[in-house]
Amino acid sequence: MNKTALNTNASRPNSFKTGPDERGHFGLFGGRFVAETLMPLILEVEKAYNAAKADPSFQQELDYYMEHYAGRPSPLYFAKRLTEHLNGAKIYFKRDELNHTGSHKINNCMGQILLARRMGKKRIIAETGAGQHGVATATVAALFDLPCTVYMGAVDIERQKPNVFRMKLLGATVVPVKSGSHTLKDAMNEALRDWVTNVEDTFYIIGTAAGPHPYPAMVRDFQSVIGKELRGQMMKAESRLPDSLVACIGGGSNAIGLFYEFLDEPTVKMYGVEAGGHGIETGKHAASLNGGRPGVLHGNRTYLLQDADGQILEGDSISAGLDYPGIGPEHSYLFDTKRVNYVSATDNEALAAFQLCCKMEGIIPALEPAHALAYVTKLAPTLPKDHLMVMNLCGRGDKDIFNVAEKLGVTL
Amino acid sequence: MSVNNRLDARFAELRAANQAGFISFTVAGDPDYETSLKLLQALPAAGVDVIELGMPFTDPMADGAAIQAADLRALAGGMTLVKTLQMVREFRALNTTTPIVLMGYYNPIYSYGAEKFARDAAQAGVDGLIIVDLPPEEDEEFRPAAQKAGMYVIRLTTPTTNEKRLPAVLSNSGGFLYYVSITGITGAATASEQQVQNAIARLKQHSKLPVAVGFGIKDAAGAQTVARHADAVVVGSAIVQTVERNLNCRHELVTNVCTYVQTLSTAVHDARKKAAA
């Protein structure tokens, strides 16, 4: 690594991988901003997680289920037709949509439920927006025979019916959240309320790399299998590291999972693509970094969509999975230190990329990675043909076809 | 620490009278600024010893449905943190003795500017602050400024706050200790008398501060039971629900809510006399 080059910028640390500190801070961000009712619970999770991390049998058990149940490693696929079409950078997809349950969410859920079992917890709760995390949680809860309650905003239940039915098939109880704005942030509020009420027996599987410490670090660790696999796969395919990584950002778990392995590789450029909704300039978006400012919500300090009084605003995105007014605190840190470039794609750009991917590669992507792909279609043509670009195709789009049909004016 | 804090004076009076204190919780701006201010001004005459005033927030995670709905009503009516401080100033112009404790969440304060808020709140006449999601581990950026301005930082303790954690919670807290009598959110289940009695005894071993008990106290009878043991009793959700029931008759809202509050405060004030009789 070229340390001299890094040191020319005073704000850049020697390593981007040292966080969080022992109290959960990534620079200004992260931490444990929770009510006293929750504090003993998250301290208990932290202690248990630290013990699990130090226990090789925990990682062995996780590796076993990741390989034989979830289907890892996910392939690294050279998107040949798309590359030819865009006529620039060489584009690879990290195929996390091929995981069991259809997204990267299983990586984290498997890790957390194994931790819950180690802790002797008897009941699982989760929040979900698009339903991908809810489905993944319901799946692992079924696998280990633990009762599972998933909180989901009433509005999201309406726009993600197939996933609601999946969760029910898997034996989970889906609770419609009708407080606040009836979406993901309110589902998270309700899950936290459940947790403080059922402190003894319940484990809360948070779906993204946000929330109070240790969740952002723990979720990142479980998701970082994505980048670790990619390093080996890319060395095998091209005998060198990728030049750029692109991932969509809601809470940011798939992105941090892709980026983390490469944060201290200065030649690897990174792009996090936020949901631009109707356009950042319209105010109707879910781009916390590009359209928000630092604040405190759901246990951590991070960039938030908020009004002048510090009241939390609703996100607005075609993708329920990106529709969250906050973002994982590590992304806020990587944004402020400029290690990662955070950009955005609008609803319409994502819809166009969604269709392009179907036709060019025979892959129906989820609307979330369609945002990442939208940025790929802008960036790749500007780059030389030997530039290696990897996009995390973090979810499949089966859940989105009804929504997309409606946007395209098609009646099913 | 302030030597002239109204909370100290009020708890000294209560101790001298061998009475438990009654703390009411209402949300600033619920259902609108004018009605909320009138209610605030009427509470002391209804027997309220300490006013706990909620600073509305869109995402009050530690609160139940009743208080979240009240927060959203206030916000829908245009309430802001600036207006909450204005309401305290207007209250103080007519009442210089009833302590006011602001309760809320950190983001609006952080957005306002933590140190500026500490100065402005103290200047407006606030005596104590409960910031639910600002635990001792994170409060260094705000607590010293609040204390310097003469306000107490009041911390929540819960049934799950164990012996190891209690010293951290108690250090730098002042005014009174707020004991959350249940594991859960405001307005939920109710703790047994024995549980409350044991918890207060435990806290008293660690701290000389008065202990106020809240969360899950739903009626006069429940308040009276807790008042036999606690230095003060907090009722929130039940009062806020009374506000909600009177939304369609706002001209009578203040009177109706105060009639209810009077039954609670009387029950609390009479608790020890009744227990002795």
Image (cartoon, coloured by chain):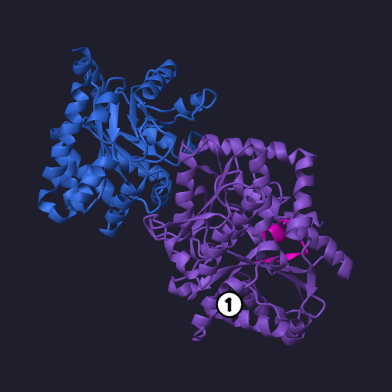
Residue A217 vs residue B193, the one in the foreground: B193
Examine the structure image and report whether residue A270 is included in the region drawn in magenta: yes
x and y percentages locating residue B62 in the rendered image: 41, 43
Q: From which residue to which does the magenta span run?
A: A255-271
Q: In the shown orientation, is residue A17 left or right of residue B151?
A: right
Q: Is residue B168 above or below residue B32?
A: above
x and y percentages locating residue B260 in the rendered image: 16, 38
Examine the structure image and report whether residue B60 is included in the region drawn in magenta: no
Query: In which chain is the residue bearing label 1?
Result: A
Q: In the shown orientation, is residue A40 left or right of residue B70?
A: right
Q: Is residue A22 above or below residue A109?
A: above
| Residue A130 visible somewhere in the drawing | no
Q: Colour of chain A?
A: purple
> Disc 1 marks which residue?
A350
| Residue B52 visible somewhere in the drawing | yes
Residue B118 vs residue A19, the one in the foreground: A19
x and y percentages locating residue B211 in the rendered image: 35, 24
Q: Colour of chain B?
A: blue
Q: Is residue B213 above or below residue A324?
A: above
Q: Residue A136: which quarter of the image?
A: bottom right
- The quarter of the rendered structure image containing the C terminus of chain B is top left
Residue at image x 63%, y 71%?
A369
Amino acid on which the number 1 mark rests in the picture: Ala
Q: In the shown orientation, is residue B149 left or right of residue B12?
A: right
Residue B115 vs residue A165, the one in the foreground: A165
Q: Residue B215: which quarter of the image?
A: top left
x and y percentages locating residue A1 in the rendered image: 82, 56
Q: Is residue A56 above or below residue A265?
A: above
Crowding near the residue tagged with mark 1, few <14, some 14–19, many ≥20 C-alpha atoms within 10 Å:
many
